[in-house]
Image (cartoon, grey):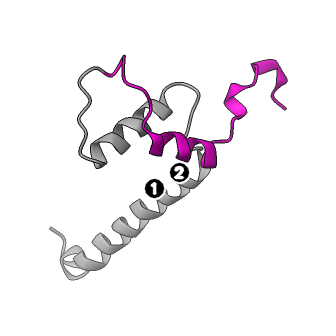
Amino acid sequence: MPSWLERHERVVVAVLCAAGALRVLVFSAAFPPFHQVDEPFHFDLVVKYASGHVPHDLASERFSPETKETIVLYGTGIFQLPWHALP
């Protein structure tokens, strides 16, 4: 390992960690949490796991009440419009 890197190893690691955190922050702020494909279903699965429920038959289970409330509060609804109606 070069001597410069040995002396500044902690600084380099800290900068890389900060860059990674900034990247996650930017992309999580730039994209909506609920996409038209299957993000609501992924979100519902995470909510169920967080509450200690492990679903056995995903096809027959409905959204949990917490998921419904979150989608109503924070979902944009823009993906429910026909593609030609989008601005």
Q: Would residue 61 be counted in the magenta stretch?
A: yes
User: Which label belongs to residue 39?
Assistant: none
Find the magenta span and give its range. 58-87
**Closest to the observer, 31 or 20:** 31
Q: Which residue is mark 2?
A: 27
Residue type, numbered disc 2: Phe
Seen as rendered, the residue at the extreme front is: 65
Q: How many marks?
A: 2
| Picture coordinates of residue 6, whole percent (x, y) | 18, 77
| Picture coordinates of residue 87, whole percent (x, y) | 84, 32
Q: Would residue 82 be counted in the magenta stretch?
A: yes
| Picture coordinates of residue 43, whole percent (x, y) | 43, 39
Q: What residue is drawn where x is 50% and y is 59%?
A: 25
Dot 1: element: helix
Dot 2: element: helix
Residue type, numbered disc 1: Val
Q: Quadrant of the N terminus?
A: bottom left
Left/right of residue 34 with respect to residue 62 in the rendered view: right
Q: Which residue is mark 1?
A: 24
